[in-house]
Image (cartoon, rainbow, N blue to C red):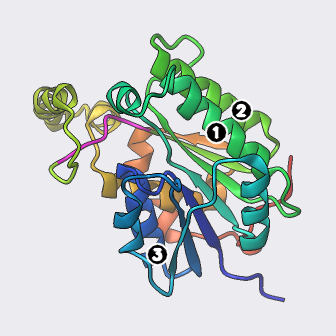
């Protein structure tokens, strides 16, 4: 019997990349349905509701293991995208202490615990960052590395996508330091690419939300990316991912390893 078409459940769907993942996944012919999660108290939940359609459902389940487990079991997604994150500035506004520990790492661990209750495991597609490593300096990259480790240790099929600096004209949130970094670095990297250093250019140049989302969705639904890290330069490339999206039997990934 032909397995059902995939269902994508997107956490962090009110965020810059998360919302783009919702839109890109909904345009993907093989995906039957996209469930976009928003915190019940999210100030951007109404923007997400405007995207609701016959293929996009908005979910406001509280971020609590029992409630999330029930929602995930009922919706039975084949792929769970983790696109959540925060900034120090936003955390101060919302009164979140140790934001990277609480959100980047803590929320990842909570979702993995909720997913663990599902009878048939989905693939976890985690949005990480270039520079995440056991030797990473700074609270943000350190938390991202430990979140990666939690994903790897979960026993669930996974794809970890390490994105470069994210931003562009479509990013409404003011991030002046990141804007300056992109303005300075991207032209320099483009010049290096023109003289043959294309790998360095593709690895370090910034991405906007749509490019990152297209790379995540493309990687999420391909058998060659199961249980591995997709680096930023690979997120940009189409290559084999468009030539053969599905393994013959893998519309849903294999059970826990």
Residue 237 visible here:
no
Secondary structure of residue under mark 1: helix
What is the number of the mark on residue 26? 3
Tell me the distance, in whole angstroms, between the alpha carbons under discs 1 and 3: 23 Å
**Which of 115/148 is in front?**
115
Query: Which label's residue is closer to the chain start, 1 or 3?
Result: 3
Counting from the top left corner in percent of width and height, residue 200 is at 31, 30
From what the image shows, is residue 142 above or below residue 55?
Answer: above
Query: Which label's residue is closer to the chain start, 3 or 2?
Result: 3
Secondary structure of residue under mark 3: helix
From what the image shows, is residue 190 above or below residue 21?
Answer: above
**Which of 216/146 is in front?**
146
What is the number of the mark on residue 35? none
Counting from the top left corner in percent of width and height, residue 177 is at 19, 25
Taking the spot 55% from the left edge, 72% from the top edge, the residue there is 34
- Determine if the magenta segment contains residue 165: yes
Counting from the top left corner in percent of width and height, residue 151 is at 70, 38
Circle 3/circle 2 CB separation < 8 Å: no
What is the number of the mark on residue 150? 2
Q: Residues within 10 Å of mark 3 (few under 14, many from 20)?
A: many
Secondary structure of residue under mark 2: helix
Q: Is residue 21 left or right of residue 176?
A: right
Which residues, given as a range, are shown in magenta? 163-168
Q: Residues within 10 Å of mark 2 (few under 14, many from 20)?
A: some
Majority secondary structure of the magenta segment? Answer: loop
- Locate residue 122: give its quadrant: bottom right
Circle 1/circle 2 CB separation < 8 Å: yes
For discs 1 and 3, the disc positioned in front in the rendered view: 1
Residue tagged 1: 108
């Amino acid at each position: 019997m032909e397995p059902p078409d995939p269902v994508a459940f997107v956490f962090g769907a009110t965020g810059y990349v998360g919302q783009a993942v919702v839109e890109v996944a909904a345009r993907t012919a093989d995906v039957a349905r996209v469930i976009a999660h928003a915190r019940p108290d999210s100030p951007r939940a109404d923007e997400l509701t405007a995207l609701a359609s016959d293929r996009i459902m908005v979910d406001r389940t509280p971020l609590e293991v029992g409630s999330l487990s029930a929602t995930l079991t009922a919706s039975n997604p084949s792929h769970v995208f983790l696109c959540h994150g925060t900034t120090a500035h936003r955390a101060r506004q919302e009164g979140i202490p140790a934001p990277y520990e609480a959100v980047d790492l803590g929320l990842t661990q909570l979702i993995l615990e909720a997913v663990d209750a599902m009878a048939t495991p989905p693939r976890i597609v985690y949005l990480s960052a270039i520079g995440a490593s056991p030797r990473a300096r700074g609270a943000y990259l350190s938390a991202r590395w430990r979140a990666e480790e939690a994903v790897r240790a979960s026993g669930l099929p996974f794809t970890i996508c390490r994105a470069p600096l994210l931003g562009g004209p479509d990013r409404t949130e003011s991030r002046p330091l990141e804007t300056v970094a992109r303005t300075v670095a991207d032209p320099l990297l483009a010049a290096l690419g023109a003289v043959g250093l294309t790998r360095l250019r593709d690895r370090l140049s910034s991405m906007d939300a749509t490019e990152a989302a297209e790379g995540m969705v493309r990687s999420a639904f391909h058998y060659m990316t199961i249980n591995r890290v997709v680096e930023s330069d690979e997120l940009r490339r189409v290559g084999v991912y468009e030539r053969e999206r599905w393994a013959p039997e893998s519309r849903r990934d294999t059970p826990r390893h």
